[in-house]
Amino acid sequence: LKPFIDENYRTKSMPLHSALMGSSMGGLISFQLFWNFPKIFGKAACLSNSFWVNDKKVFEMINQNKNQFSDQNRLYIDCGSEEKELIEDFNRMVNELKDIHSETEFDFGSYIDKGSHHTESDWANRLHIPLRFLFGRSI
C-alpha cells in the first residue's frame, strides 16, 4: 500500500516522514513494521501493545535485529496503569528497549498513563503525547 500511495499522491516518502500508529493489536503491528522496516517506516507510536500475542515472540524479534536504526528513527510505546493484563509485558519491553537503545541510535520514549484502561477514550486522551514525540520535541 505504501508504494502505491507514494507513487500516486504527493507524499514525502522518506522514513523521516513515514510514521505508524496503533493501539492494542494495531500497536503491536505498528511496532513490528517499524522494527523490521526502519528504512521505510522511520517513526512509530504504539499504544497499549499486545506483546503477549504469538507466545510473546516479539521479544525474540527485537533481540535478533538490534542494529539497523539511525538517529532519525523514533519509537514510542505506552500503557495505561490499569491495563493489568499488559503492564508486565510493557515494563519488560521498556527495559529491553532501553538496553538495545544504548547500543543503537534510535530515539525511544515510553509512558505509563496513570489511571488509564484499555479503551479508545483513554488512548484519545493521551494522543497528544505520541504525536508530540514523533513530530515535535522528544519527551
Image (spheres, grey):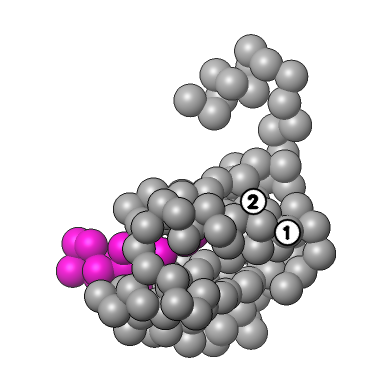
Q: Identify the amino acid type marked 1.
A: Arg
Q: Residue furthest right?
A: 137
Given this view, does label 2 or label 1 mark the residue nearer the observer? 1
- Residue 109 appears left or right of 24: right
Q: Position of residue 84 (x, y in %)?
A: 29, 79
- Disc 2 versus disc 1: distance between alpha carbons? 15 Å
Which region shows up in magenta?
Answer: 46-59
Badge 1 element: helix
**Label 1 neighbour load within 10 Å: few <14, some 14-19, many 20+:** few
Residue 34 visible in the snapshot: no
In the image, 126 versus 60, the foreground residue is 126
**Label 2 neighbour load within 10 Å: few <14, some 14-19, many 20+:** many
Q: Position of residue 118 (x, y in %)?
A: 35, 63
Please identify the quadrant where the C terminus is shown: bottom right
Q: Which residue is mark 2?
A: 42
Point 67% across, 68% down: residue: 106
In the image, 124 versus 135, the foreground residue is 124
Q: Which residue is mark 1?
A: 132
**Mark 2 or mark 1, earlier in chain:** 2
Q: Position of residue 124 (x, y in %)?
A: 53, 53
